[in-house]
Image: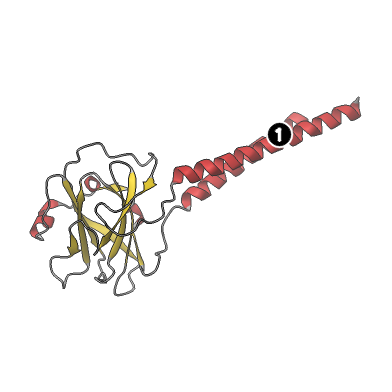
Amino acid sequence: MNSRWLGRVVIAASAAGVLAIAGATSAQAHDTPTPPYDAVLQNSHHNKLATDFTDGCKDVDDAGIDHAQNEDVWVFNTPSDEFDPAIGVKAQFRRLDNTVVTELIPGSSFDNGFGNSPSHTHLAWIVLPAGWTLVDAEGKTKGDQTRFVVTHTCPGTATTRPPTPGDSQSSGGGGGGGGGSLPVTGVAVGTMAVLGVGLLAAGVALLMVRRRRDVSDLIDG
């Protein structure tokens, strides 16, 4: 009887830990913009390299965006709206050293702008060192658009291997003075913390079972 009850307790504690971890992971999704921004990056475009997109260099070159071989060009698009050029886009990128930085359009020290003229503000672009990973982004639009996308990239050639999404992250300053860094809530750190709580709960349950068995043995004796 005690062994069956023990099994049920351990299974329940483990299941609770798994559910808590899943909740912590899903909580990392960025679905609500932070003021003054009113639109967020499409979920499927998070944690992407420039090489993950197909539309590329020809349109970027036709738009007159200058870039070198060791640079990536990122172009954001709010299809049915326009970005507010006074506030624009705030994007997080993971650099090759695995630090996460925030770049602003406008405001970054890297080349950036809107469309190919002041009247084409449905496009916002930035030129960054090759191999950086787009983590997340927010934008300020002139209308009621709540999502925007990466519409074009022109990948360069990175000098070293970009880190994988599972590597550790830390926040850092912009590549040359872009805006202040967004808080980084790493999935790995949060997951480990929740896993620790789940294991602790399982340990407490096992201790209670042991004490209950000891009391039962004394009574039976």
Residue 81 in the image, given as x and y percentages of width and height: 26, 71
What kind of residue is marked 1?
Answer: Leu
Q: From this view, report whether residue 163 is shown above or below residue 56.
A: above
Q: From this view, report whether residue 12 is shown above or below residue 33.
A: above
Q: From this view, report whether residue 17 is shown above or below residue 111.
A: above
Q: Residue at x 26, y 46 (%)?
A: 132
Q: Quadrant of the N terminus?
A: top right
Left or right for 170, reference 199: left
Left or right for 100, reference 127: right
Characterize the local packing of mark 1: few (<14), some (14-19) or many (20 or more) Cα atoms within 10 angstroms: some
Left or right for 13, reference 42: right
Provide the residue designation for mark 1.
206
Element on which disc 1 rests: helix
Left or right for 97, reference 202: left
Q: Residue at x 26, y 65 (%)?
A: 78
Which of 182 and 140 lies nearest the eye of the viewer? 182
Residue 207 in the image, given as x and y percentages of width and height: 73, 34
Residue 181 in the image, given as x and y percentages of width and height: 35, 56
Q: Residue at x 20, y 56 (%)?
A: 110
Which of 2 and 143 lies nearest the eye of the viewer? 143
Q: Quadrant of the C terminus?
A: top right
* Residue 143: quadrant of the picture: bottom left
Q: How many marks?
A: 1
Q: Residue at x 48, y 53 (%)?
A: 27
Q: From this view, report whether residue 121 is shown above or below residue 67.
A: below
